Each structure stands twice: as structure tokens, then as C-alpha cells.
Amino acid sequence: MTNEKQVNKEDIVNRLKKIEGQVKGIQKMIDEDKCCSEVMVQISAIRSAINRVGGLIMDRYIKECLKDSLYSGKNDDDIETVIETIVKYVK
């Protein structure tokens, strides 16, 4: 694994751990009967964070898959797979 991939992977894992902590925080807020608006703010923060992680993963996926497909000559199939993945992600 290249150094750039390792840094990217570590960044993604760290972000996911932070999101996991945020989810646990929401569980605690629910247990403590916190105000619904406070819970919704935290849910919004998690949604934003997970979208950023998804964007990082999508960026990595597209760069790796498209680069590989250009060299392998299977552009059409790989590009179609990337498009399908993007469509699923944005739903």
C-alpha cells in the first residue's frame, strides 16, 4: 500500500471512529432525555460527517478504478460500475 493510500485509509478510519463516538453520544442524550432539538443537531452533524467519509471513499474508488480501467482496456464496464456506485451513493 502506498503512503498516500495509507494516509487516506487512516483518515477514513479516524473519521469513522469519531462518527461512532457521536452516535454513542446521541444514545446517551436519548437515555438522558435531552431536548429533541439538541439530538437533531447531533444527527445533522453525523449525517454531514458520514457524507464526507463517503466522498473520500468515492474519490479513492473512482481514482483507483478509473486508472486501472484505462490501463486494462475494460473502460466501458468499469465506468458503468463507477456510475452505478455513484447513483447508489447519492440516493
Image (tube, grey):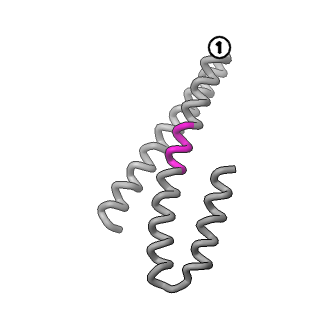
Give the main secondary structure of the magenta stretch: helix
| The image quarter in which residue 82 lies | bottom right
Q: Position of residue 49 (x, y in %)?
A: 52, 39
* The furthest residue to the left: 3
User: Viewer-proximal residue, 60 or 12?
Assistant: 60
- The residue at the point 58 percent across, 33 percent down is 23
* In the rendered image, the vertical position of residue 68 relative to residue 55, given as above or below: below
**In magenta segment, residue 51:** yes
* In the rendered image, the vertical position of residue 91 relative to residue 40, given as above or below: below
Q: Which residue bears the numbered disc 1? A: 35
Q: Where is residue 46 in the image (x, y as percent from the top left)?
A: 56, 35
- The residue at the point 50 percent across, 63 percent down is 61
Q: Where is residue 57 in the image (x, y as percent from the top left)?
A: 50, 56
Identify the amino acid type marked 1: Cys
- The residue at the point 67 percent across, 17 percent down is 36
* In the rendered image, the vertical position of residue 21 relative to residue 39, given as above or below: below
User: Viewer-proximal residue, 86 or 15?
Assistant: 86
> What crowding class fits label 1: few (fewer than 14 Cα within 10 Å), some (14-19), or many (20 or more)?
few
| The image quarter in which residue 7 lies | bottom left
Task: Please identify the quadrant where the N terminus is shown.
Answer: bottom left
Label 1: state its secondary structure: loop
Q: What stretch is highlighted in magenta?
A: 48-54
User: Viewer-proximal residue, 69 or 26?
Assistant: 69
Q: Where is residue 52 in the image (x, y as percent from the top left)?
A: 50, 44
- The residue at the point 62 percent across, 27 percent down is 27
Q: How many numbered marks does the figure carry?
A: 1
